[in-house]
Amino acid sequence: MDTRQPLAAQLRPKTLDTFVGQTHLLGPNKPLRRAILEGLPHSLIFWGPPGTGKTTLAKMLAQQSQFAFVALSAVMVGIKEVRETIQQAQKRFEQEQKRTVLFIDEVHRFNKTQQDVFLPYIEDGTIVFVGATTENPSFQVNNALLSRCRVYVLQSLTSEDLLNITERAIHFLSNEAECFEVPEDLKTTLVKSCDGDARQLLNLIEILNAHANSYQGKKVVDESLLQQALTGTLTRFDNKGDYFYDCISALHKSVRGSSPDAALYWFARLLVGGADPLYVARRVVRMASEDIGNADPKALQLALNAWEAQEKLGSPEGELALAQAISYLAVAPKSNAVYKAFKTAMLDAEHEGTQPVPLHLRNAPTKLMKAEGYGKAYRYDHDEPGAFAKGQTYFPKELGEKRYYYPVNRGLEIKIREKLEQLRAASLSSPTTE
């Protein structure tokens, strides 16, 4: 055992037979498996959570192909270092006829202009480019680089995968002189705490091994030691990264799907992960308008009240108010009629040109405007029977009469729909006023 290297490095798999997880990419006849085993690498991007094997697979790809492997982190280097590395790869090919796998960790940290540096060298075969990212490459990697790479999506390791790795680590740390042991129930707790991240798991096991007390040839982890090692949150997501937005999406869809329990779970996940409750509050206001609208107008007011409570009270009182609003929105009658109507109206406003406001709808504060017909023939609704000027139009003449808002047959919109049908029927029976 090389004590100079972290346990995660010492246990890094060297072959596909010892690699754990990602069976959807490494199963029989899968393109990635064939590329590694046949020594035929291609430029690619690994997208997935931390600790799922991105670096390991890149190293396997180079090793099996007998290519040089050079790793850089976009967090640590700039374009100058990248250019120097590529020059070395060119010399290596010229002098040794050996190509290079250039692995760029955290490739999303390079801006899209910096990413262009790789393009000509991918094209001429100087390098096989392998990028690794925890962020969605369709947003963080420029199209030119994406078009030259195949994207492989890695998944979080399952509990079974992590238990497999745990057993390997325990066996590796045990020797003839001393046995390292972790009770079965604590293995489950340990695996759960790592949230699909093998590197985090191995780091924790290394800490446990270093601090476990020796007794009669055994080093046994107890619950107290494990709890000391499990510092920090057990939930993984980078605030404002993919996991953050995935959880926000799950919260919104749970509210839309009328599942208060799931909505509260995702809200809790966001809080545990470090999300700003005020950001969640803004999204809850959006949900109230987008998915409930006029089916229950109280939903918007409750969402605004919860936002205000969070601003004034902070945690945890404000979070409870948000939880109240979220659960109310989830069980409220649903309607996206206003949302759809507004989107359609925006499209017309953007694409139908600057249509003139009909004269009868214009104010006429001056004599000239009155002379031009501004406000002429306008009928003041409050002077009409039922406070409704039957037949009066409100759209530009060139656009014609449009209908955007179609209330649904749920909640208050049932009555709104009935009222609108009555008003439209009354207008149709009266002459049009323009």
Image: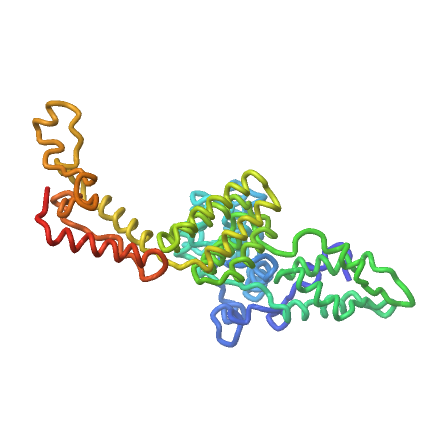
From this viewpoint, which residue is outermost toward the top?
Answer: 367
From this viewpoint, which residue is outermost toward the right?
Answer: 216
The picture places residue 193, in percent across and down from the top left corner, at 67, 60
Image position of 250 (left or right of 413): right
Which quadrant is the N terminus positioned in? bottom right
> Is residue 97 something that shows in the picture?
no
Quadrant of residue 419 within the rendered picture: bottom left
Image position of 37 (left or right of 234): left
From this viewpoint, which residue is outermost toward the bottom?
Answer: 28
Scheme of colours in the image: rainbow
Asked whether 229 or 369 is in front, the reply is 369
> Is residue 254 something that shows in the picture?
yes
Quadrant of residue 122 within the rendered picture: bottom left
The picture places residue 260, in percent across and down from the top left corner, at 51, 60
Q: Decide: is 378 above or below 231.
A: above
Which quadrant is the C terminus positioned in? top left
The picture places residue 58, in percent across and down from the top left corner, at 56, 60
Image position of 258 (left or right of 55): left
